[in-house]
Amino acid sequence: MTTPSQSVGEPTIKTILRLLRWDKPAGRLILMIPALWAVFLAARGLPPIPLVLVIILGSLATSGAGCVINDLWDRDIDPQVERTSDRPLASRALSVKTGIIVSLVALGCAAVLAFYLNPFTFALCVAAVPVIIAYPLAKRFFPVPQLVLALAWGFAVLISWSAVTGTVETPTLFLWTAVVLWTLGFDTVYAMSDREDDAKIGVNSSALFFGSRTPLAVGLFFLGTAGFLADLGLILNLKTGFWLAWLVAIAGWLWQYLQLCRENLPKPIYGLIFRQNVVFGFILLLGMIVGL
């Protein structure tokens, strides 16, 4: 599976891990967080440990598969983008055949884990697959492809909540909306670092769609996230611990909005803001558990 263009001295397994993006844990954790929010809230703070393990492993497998599928579609685009030019399929360090095999294995692992769940939740897992596949295609024809990613992220809430209760309830929808808005916020920030390359190539992103109003859009997405989380806290009667975590997250999102409003913001700040949202997500998870 090694090709002549593979990094000198890099074992194939390490290249495959880079393909799955398991060398960059922030992107894997930020999908796991909404799933954990949902499973703990639905179980009122005491979910079955085996289910939590299934959720964690399933999110790792699913997000890994999504990354490989994305890179398969974008293998001729990624070399033209500074941030993605060294990805294994873009740099031809791995072949397309290897990418397809890795994606199928990852999806197969997710499917095996999904059999642990109830039939309704399993059906939601199946429904999520077309959305995951559609995301990398969306940037070619849809003006806000980050919305498709946000909808894919939202399945983490529906799947995890229904895995506990067997259904989708009103609080589920509040949490789903919060996650969709949160994902639109942090992934729009992520897209801001690629604006020049995306415009040159001719692919879409929310950062290009909102243009000079992108910081305002991100701020409104985070504000909406805070609002729906507050509604959720009231519906579930969450206690002080949740509200303290909620205030910390709001303060963080406000700081991020103010940073995005600065002129000539250095590109590393966009990645920092993305990683900070992982921290905020875990702070909110802790607040939810304590607040229950």
Image: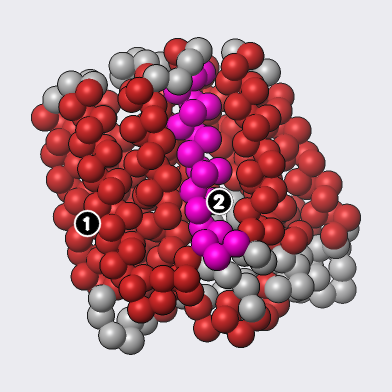
Q: Secondary structure at mark 2?
A: helix
Q: Quadrant of residue 185?
A: bottom left
Q: Quadrant of residue 44?
A: top left
Q: Is residue 238 above or below residue 220?
A: above
Residue in view at x 75 percent, y 61 percent: 73
Is 53 placed left or right of 10 in the picture? left
Q: Amino acid at mark 1?
A: Gly
Q: Is residue 248 above or below residue 35?
A: below
Residue in view at x 64 percent, y 21 percent: 122
Tell me how far mark 2 sits from mark 1, CA to CA. Answer: 25 Å
Q: Position of residue 192 (x, y in %)?
A: 44, 73
Residue in view at x 58 percent, y 32 percent: 57
Is 160 part of what is drawn in magenta? yes
Quadrant of image for the N terminus: bottom right
Crowding near the residue tagged with mark 2, few <14, some 14–19, many ≥20 C-alpha atoms within 10 Å? many
Tag in front: 2 or 1: 2
* Residue wearing tag 1: 252
Is 7 part of what is drawn in magenta? no
Q: Position of residue 189 (x, y in %)?
A: 40, 66
* Residue wearing tag 2: 148
- Observer-nearest residue: 67 or 154? 154
Which residues, given as a range, are shown in magenta?
A: 142-163
Q: Is residue 82 visible?
A: no
Predominant SS of the magenta segment: helix
Is 87 placed left or right of 196 in the picture? right
Is 169 placed left or right of 111 in the picture? left
